[in-house]
Image (cartoon, rainbow, N blue to C red):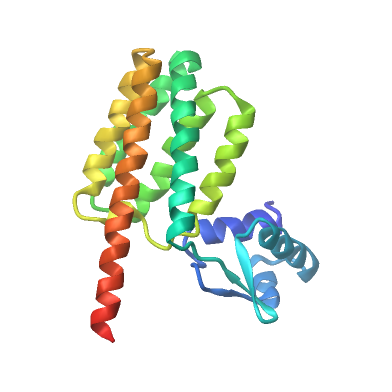
Amino acid sequence: MKDAYSLILAAIDGGIYRPGDRLVESELAERFGVSRTPVREALQRLETQSMLKRDGRSLIIATLDHNQLAELYTVRAELEALAARLAANHATPEEIRVLAGMVEEDRKMLGDPQALSRSNRRFHHQVHLASHNRYLVQQLDLVHRSMALMARTTLAAKGRDAVSLDEHQAIVDAITARDAKGAEDALRRHISMAYETRLKEEARRVVDIGLDE
């Protein structure tokens, strides 16, 4: 059975709890069927990792401001590009076939942004593993944990899902060809496009909020 930390993190990642939501120790203990002590320890750990922040005596899920978003995508682009380059050099034939299969399976999910979002995380994690560098994988796990603080997936933007899968295919093609530079560039372009889409969506959301006031 997963520990309280993993359960809470999975709930945040899965959208059960979203940025700005208040996390109550007793409610979490009841939801996950654990005692309050491990929940308290898990919340303290998440606060230390900046996943949670204090609001008086309460803990709420953190949100990312514009600058934090830029910083996160900058680090993500560099680390993921490195993972793709290493994957092109070190991925086994079996790992490459798994990556290719993921892209094909994901095409069946077009139009379902939440399902694609989950599958997208699996695809990227598989690229990380294919790098065969445990320290890089650990750092990318931390980065992707912070990605859970984004309330919406860019895959919900019109047309982004199909384009994103084409970008995944380009990454797989480069890894298959053992083209390290090509894989690095393809992954970097993929993150850049995702970031650009998110900026557009955030700008649109701000305008919509302004119109409602």
Q: Quick check: 83 left or right of 58?
A: left
**Residue farthest along the left direction in this orientation:** 159
Image x and y of residue 213, in percent: 28, 87
Residue shown at 72% from the left, 58% from the top:
45
Q: Quick check: 66 left or right of 135?
A: left
- The residue nearer to you, when weighing 139 against 126, is 139
Kindly indicate the quadrant of the structure image that contains residue 176.
Answer: top left
Image x and y of residue 154, in percent: 32, 53
Residue shown at 39% from the left, 21% from the top:
97
Q: Quick check: 142 left or right of 125?
A: right
Image x and y of residue 10, in percent: 56, 55
Q: Is residue 132 visible?
A: yes
- The residue nearer to you, when weighing 67 against 131, is 67
Residue shown at 67% from the left, 73% from the top:
30
Q: Quick check: 141 left or right of 113?
A: right
Would you place residue 24 above or below residue 172 in this image?
below
